[in-house]
Image (cartoon, rainbow, N blue to C red):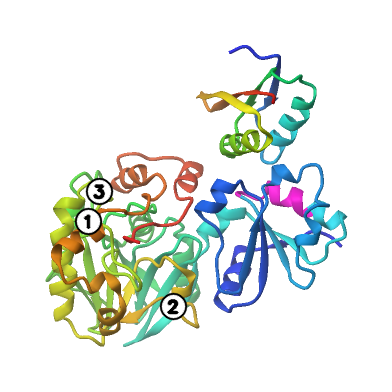
Amino acid sequence: MDLKQTQASEVASKVINKQDLFILDVRNEEAYGDWKIEGESITSMNVPYFDLIDGVEDLLPELPKDKEILVVCAKEGSSIFVGEELVEAGVENVSYLSGGMKAWSEYLEPVKVGDLPGGALYQFVRIGKGCLSYMIESNGEAAVVDASRMIENYTTFTENKGLTIKATMDTHLHADHISGGKALADQVNGTYYLPEEDAGEVTFPFTALKENNKMVIGEVTIEPIYSPGHTIGSTSLMINDAYLLTGDILFVESIGRPDLAGKAEDWVLDLRTTLYNRYKEMAGELTVLPAHFSKVAELGDTGVVSAKLEELYEKNDGLNVEEEAEFRRMVTENLPPQPNAYQEIRETNMGKITPNEETRREMEIGPNRCAVN
Amino acid sequence: MEAQKTLDAKGLACPMPIIKTKKAMKDLESGQVLEIQATDKGAQSDLTAWAKSGGHELMKSEETDGVFYFWIKKA
């Protein structure tokens, strides 16, 4: 038996299709505690590789006999080392995750949300980091919303379908991941849209994403709706009066945090007004499509993360806090830690710093942490 | 900082810096210090965690020109 290689795409498919997988994560305990591969059908255990250098004998009784075993580490070197030890010890069905957690963090799974006149709406699920980006396509034209840094995912997709990307847009200045919006727009000679209020320190040219400035892609209308709170510029996008892309303002199981630009107290009221007035006036049957999820359980049967707006007004705790003071506490106190390197990520998205590719990958390690809980 | 032994693990990727550190530590007496030089970013958190789990003391670490230096005192 040789040690096999498993691709991040295969792991994503197991998570989405709820197929059994046993993960032996050999990173250190802190890294594992911070962020790991999760899913309903995933069982994982953590034993740092440095405890397995002298052999894996003590570990063997703890490994399942009837399941596939996937060894995972940060990049892949240590998982190959441990995987080979396991194979030598006679363990069957062992593989390692090619590219490690870095590859997991960067993998995007495109899933179809629904049809649109002349085309469709796709959600690109960055399953490892909990980021969601979108592609609207109609009559051969496409727009990409909240694009990730790995822009080849979108260009490969459009090439296969014979689409031309006309525009890219960010619903806000991101703090958890490096935006691919500007780079993608430049590559395809498209227009890059960003809310002006978030772009005070942005060093490159962009087009303002503004309420009342509707955009048209094929037969589909994209309508910006100013919805501040996570950032002062946060803007939602209404797609053909059917889908509401909420960015980092409203998630399926939580709401956006107002503190990542250091202005939690100032932006609490904006967040409250957006969630308790602006969105509330909208049609309940709108399908909400957020820019993040926090738990894999939020993925539906086909992998799509979405909910009806009226459903969220019933179930989402962040939308059901009557007292303003209590709401203020909820979104400003006891917040989770900030996303990894969030300040450097914001500066990169403003064009103020230009880290190399390897540093960009490192900066994005870990979960998104854009929700209040 | 004074060290009884120096390990050059520059250019090596995980898991090699730790494997070599572990081996080098075997040649030291309790209380002696090993200096490790590494360029792999993961080495930082892994060496810290490894030293802790083995009861060794990570006395100091610093980064100069892309090289990470660690001084670990053997338990």
> Residue A316's image quarter?
bottom left
Tell which subunit mark 2 falls on.
Answer: A
- Answer with left or right where residue A364 lies relative to residue A240: right
> Residue A38's image quarter?
bottom right
In the picture, the quarter occupied by the C terminus of chain A is: bottom left
- Answer with left or right where residue A322 lies relative to residue B61: left
- Answer with left or right where residue A205 lies relative to residue A341: left
Disc on the earlier residue, 1 or 2: 1
* Secondary structure state at the residue bearing disc 3: loop
- Answer with left or right where residue B60 lies relative to residue A240: right
Q: Which residue is mark 2?
A: A304
Disc on the earlier residue, 3 or 1: 1
Label 3: few (<14), some (14–19) or many (≥20) C-alpha neighbours in 10 Å: some
Mark yes or no: residue A209 visible.
Answer: no
On the image, the x and y values in percent for residue A206 come to 23, 54
Q: Which residue is mark 1?
A: A231
Q: Check disc 1 and give the amino acid type.
A: Thr
Residue occupying the point 17% across, 58% down: A268
Q: Is residue A109 magenta?
A: no
* Above or below A256: residue A175: above
